[in-house]
């Protein structure tokens, strides 16, 4: 027979979701609508997550990935979905939001003009530093060094025995680009050019002269860093 105390056990206290404790003007969705650029990463992430527990879930994601947006970007959807409260649908929503941000390559519909290696690096660094394989991409430029398109021409180890130089210029010739900037990433995070990087650059520069397409630079992208082979005099003889 149960005792009276057992029958009337006090239920665990219910804690309101943090969203419910905030005035409307301090809630993530309201803050994003008012001025997204002034929001913290936690607020932006909470707005993407949505739902009553959005703040707690956003905090859990940031805690899991040490508050590093690049770690979140690199994480597989399954890894994100394993965080308490996230799930597969929300994980996909987060990945989609990050992918949209990574594809922003222009402002107000105007083409980006490349005036320096730093301009080119800024265009691709955010996305390419998170790639888990080596990708080789080409920025196609018009006569004013404005970006016509960024095309991916190769995925895998970038070395002189595997990269077909003709593929680097295929889209440049088809779209009548005046110049190109070649970019590839090092998944290790160290952008130091390898001997193969220099050999590939030399072959690409020579082919560009034959095709009358100016090879302006070859950038190697690392984790938050990049190297211009042209600035270092590597492969541009």
Image (spheres, rainbow, N blue to C red):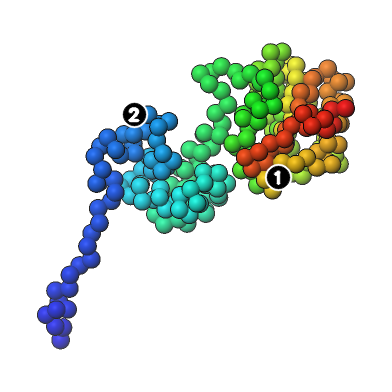
Q: Is residue 48 above or below residue 103?
A: below
Quarter of the image where the N terminus is located: bottom left
SS for tag 2? helix
Q: Say which mark, if any, is on residue 142.
A: none
Q: Residue at x 51, y 39 (%)?
A: 98
Q: CA distance from mark 2 to mark 1?
A: 39 Å
Residue 35 falls in image quadrant? top left
Residue drawn at 36 percent across, 43 percent down:
50
Q: Is residue 55 visible?
A: yes
Pointers 2 and 1 in contact (CB under 8 A)?
no
Tell me which numbered mark, 2 or 1, is placed earlier along the sequence: 2
55 left or right of 155? Answer: left
Q: Quadrant of residue 39?
A: top left
Is residue 95 depicted above or below 56 in this figure?
Answer: above
Q: Position of residue 76 (x, y in %)?
A: 55, 50
- Check disc 1 and report the residue beneath it: 190
Residue that carries the numbered disc 2 in the rendered image: 34
Q: Residue at x 77, y 29 (%)?
A: 231
């Amino acid at each position: 027979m149960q005792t009276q105390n057992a029958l009337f056990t006090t239920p665990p206290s219910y804690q309101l979701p943090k969203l419910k404790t905030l005035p409307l003007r301090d809630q993530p969705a309201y803050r994003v609508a008012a001025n997204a650029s002034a929001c913290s990463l936690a607020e932006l992430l909470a707005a993407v997550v949505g739902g009553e527990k959005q703040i707690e879930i956003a905090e859990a994601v940031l805690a899991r990935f040490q508050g590093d947006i690049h770690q979140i970007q690199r994480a597989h959807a399954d890894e994100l979905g394993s965080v308490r409260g996230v799930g597969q649908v929300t994980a996909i929503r987060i990945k989609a939001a990050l992918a949209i941000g990574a594809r922003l390559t222009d402002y107000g519909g105007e083409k980006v003009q490349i005036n320096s290696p730093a301009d080119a690096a800024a265009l691709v660094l955010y996305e390419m530093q998170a790639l888990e394989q080596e990708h080789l991409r080409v920025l196609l430029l018009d006569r004013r060094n404005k970006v016509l398109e960024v095309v991916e021409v190769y995925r895998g180890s970038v070395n002189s025995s595997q990269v077909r130089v003709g593929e680097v210029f295929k889209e440049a010739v088809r779209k009548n680009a005046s110049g190109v900037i070649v970019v590839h990433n090092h998944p290790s995070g160290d952008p130091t050019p390898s001997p193969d990087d220099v050999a590939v650059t030399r072959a690409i520069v020579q082919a560009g002269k034959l095709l009358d397409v100016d090879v302006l630079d070859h950038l190697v992208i690392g984790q938050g860093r990049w190297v211009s082979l042209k600035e270092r005099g590597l492969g541009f003889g």
